Amino acid sequence: RLHLQTHGIEYSTVAATICTEKGHNMHTNLSSISEKFDIITLFDVIEHIYDVPVFFKTLSNILSKDGLVILLTGNN
């Protein structure tokens, strides 16, 4: 069994509490994260980002040297 540590960003305090109760580490925004991650997943998020280049620059700051970003979107 893998012992993974999961993190998420959630603006809703109610949803963040539910996620925390399920064992996830929750953050209120991307800029508050100082850790490095091996994998970052983005599911149905990119279409909500106003400044995509700045967003990816911020992701690169928290991504491990050989880390992966997995992006999925249903919208064109």
Image (tube, rainbow, N blue to C red):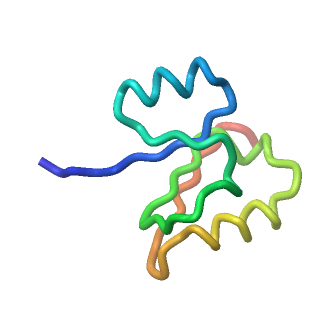
Q: Residue at the location (69% across, 32% down)?
A: 11
Q: Position of residue 18 (x, y in %)?
A: 47, 21
Q: Residue furthest bottom?
A: 65
Q: Which residue is drawn at 81% across and 65% down?
A: 54
Q: Which residue is drawn at 46% across and 64% down?
A: 37
The quarter of the picture where the C terminus appears is: top right
The residue sitting at 77% across, 43% down in the picture is: 47
Left or right: where 8 falls relative to 32: left
Position of residue 16 measured from the top left corner of the image (x, y, whole percent): 55, 28
Look at the picture and state if 43 lies above or below 65.
Answer: above
Q: Outermost residue toward the left?
A: 1
Question: In the visual, does 15 lie left or right of 55?
Answer: left
Tell whether 72 sits left or right of 65.
right
Q: Quadrant of residue 20?
A: top left
Q: x%, y% of residue 49?
A: 80, 47
Residue 33 percent location from the top left of the image? 60, 57
Q: Which one is nearer the viewer's eye here, 41 or 18?
A: 18
Up the image or down, 51 lies above or below 6; here it is: below
Note whether 65 is above or below 6 in the view shown. below
Q: How many labels does the image show?
A: 0
Q: Residue furthest right?
A: 50
Say which of 6 and 43 sits in front: 6
- Please say if 52 is above or below 5: below
